[in-house]
Image (tube, rainbow, N blue to C red):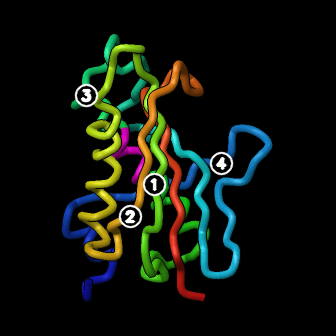
Amino acid sequence: MTKSIDARLQELGIELPAAAAPAANYVPYVHSGSQLFISGQLPNIGGGEQFTGKVGADVDTETAQRAARACALNILAQAKAALGDLDRIERCLRLGGFVNATPDFTDHPEVINGASNLIVELLGDIGKHSRFAVGCGSLPRNVPVEVDATFAVKD
């Protein structure tokens, strides 16, 4: 990808939110050597659409995908706070997705595609990553999804 990530954001009309402060006893990211670990990000963005509820009961798959996309925006906001420049990202290594879902819901991968698709759309080939998508009985603040990330970065 030759275009900068910030230029790609601008081209798509996407503005990154402010990086959220941690809500408990953890840090939002850890930069160790050539890796950047981003703590799990919730989908709520100040002033934007707020997401709550259980997928399969209160939230449909399409809405949950938008929530996962919001998590990815929050991940990139944390990466920018950590690195100062998103173009220091060499590769998205992994996304981990948790879906607050009913026991009979089975489309977890489709939900987390909301985050994966945005990362690949913005980063191109270096955005292609390994991933997991699992269901769980609840998530903090009753959000439908939480996503974390690991990036390889340039020093």
Q: CA distance from mark 3 to mark 4?
A: 28 Å
Where is mark 3, residue-wise? 61
Magenta span of residues: 68-73
Q: Look at the image and say whether residue 22 sits in the magenta stretch.
A: no
Q: Nearer the viewer, residue 134 or 75?
A: 134
Identify the mark nearer the N-term, 3 or 4: 4
Q: CA distance from mark 1 to mark 3?
A: 19 Å
Res 129 label: 2
Q: Nearer the viewer, residue 19 or 92?
A: 92
Q: Residue at x 44, y 47 (%)?
A: 132
Q: CA distance from mark 1 to mark 4?
A: 20 Å
Q: CA distance from mark 3 to mark 2?
A: 22 Å
Mark 4 belongs to which amino acid? Ala
- Find residue 119 and report its image quarter: bottom left
In the rendered image of this protein, does residue 153 appear above or below residue 40?
Answer: below
Q: Residue at x 42, y 18 (%)?
A: 53
Circle 3 or circle 2, nearest the eye: 2
Circle 4 or circle 2, nearest the eye: 2
**Label 3 with label 2: CB-CB less than 8 Å:** no
- Find residue 54 and report its image quarter: top left
Disc 4 secondary structure class: loop
Specify whether 94 is left or right of 37: left
Q: CA distance from mark 4 to mark 2?
A: 26 Å
Bin the neighbour count of mark 3 within 10 Å (Cα to Cα): few under 14, some 14-19, many 20 and up. some
Q: Is residue 44 visible?
A: no
Q: Residue at x 36, y 36 (%)?
A: 67
Where is mark 1, residue-wise? 95
Specify whether 25 is left or right of 46: right
Where is residue 133? Give x, y as percent.
Answer: 41, 41
